[in-house]
Image (cartoon, rainbow, N blue to C red):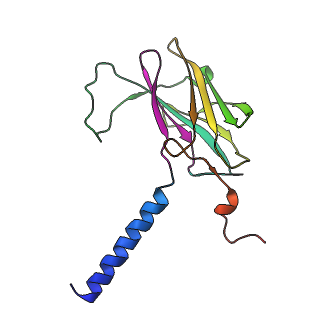
Amino acid sequence: MTRRRFQMAILAAIALLGALSIAGPVAAHEQRDIGESAQFHVVVGFLNEPAVQGELNAISVRITRNDPSATPAAEGEAIEREPVEGVQGALTFEIIYEDQTAELPVEAVWRDPGHYVAYVIPTQPGVYSFRISGEIDGIAFEEVFTGGPETFSEVTPREELEFPANG
């Protein structure tokens, strides 16, 4: 191998490792089946991740119907699900930080069927939880989702991402 190719291979490896280290801390949204017979599938997290202290964000919830007659998908294969539309009035989104709780108004996302948001500016860094409750097609549910490494982003202190540094 020539010296030039060796250097290019090393640079490519460094770039790949750098990309993986940046993507590593960012958690995906949490997915869960809800309802007595798991009739619905929800994907919950912050709308913008990583979530940053003092920045406008939102609780993001996507709701779809599970098809009880569907054949299980192979690993890594996408599952087609029907979005649940028009239920924003039947949903309650609460945000929880330590001992504080606030109910937020729920909105349907325009031109994105089955996607609902509740806007918020998280003022403190750390772990937040979302309580999602309501009734869809006569099926009541209440679920709590908590940020963390296996779920969705914790709120990052703003100064960790600011550039140039203030002061």
- At a point 75% along the width and 69% down the height, the residue shown is 166
Residue 143 vs 75, above or below: the answer is above
Lateral position of residue 163 relative to residue 138, left or right: right
Q: Which of 55 and 86 is in front in this view?
A: 55
Reply yes or no: does residue 29 show up in magenta.
yes
Q: Where is residue 86 in the image (x, y as percent from the top left)?
A: 54, 24
- The quarter of the image holding the N terminus is bottom left
Number of numbered discs: 0
Q: What stretch is highlighted in magenta?
A: 27-49
- The quarter of the image holding the C terminus is bottom right
Lateral position of residue 119 relative to residue 142, left or right: right
Q: Quadrant of residue 9?
A: bottom left
Q: Quadrant of residue 134?
A: top right
Q: Nearer the viewer, residue 87 or 53?
A: 53
Q: Nearer the viewer, residue 25 or 117?
A: 25
Return the residue found at the far right. Answer: 167
Q: In which quarter of the image is residue 67?
A: top left
Return the residue found at the far top. Answer: 138
Q: Where is residue 40 in the image (x, y as percent from the top left)?
A: 44, 23
Q: Where is residue 3 in the image (x, y as percent from the top left)?
A: 27, 88
Q: Position of residue 116 (x, y in %)?
A: 56, 33
- At a point 46% along the width and 56% down the height, the residue shown is 24
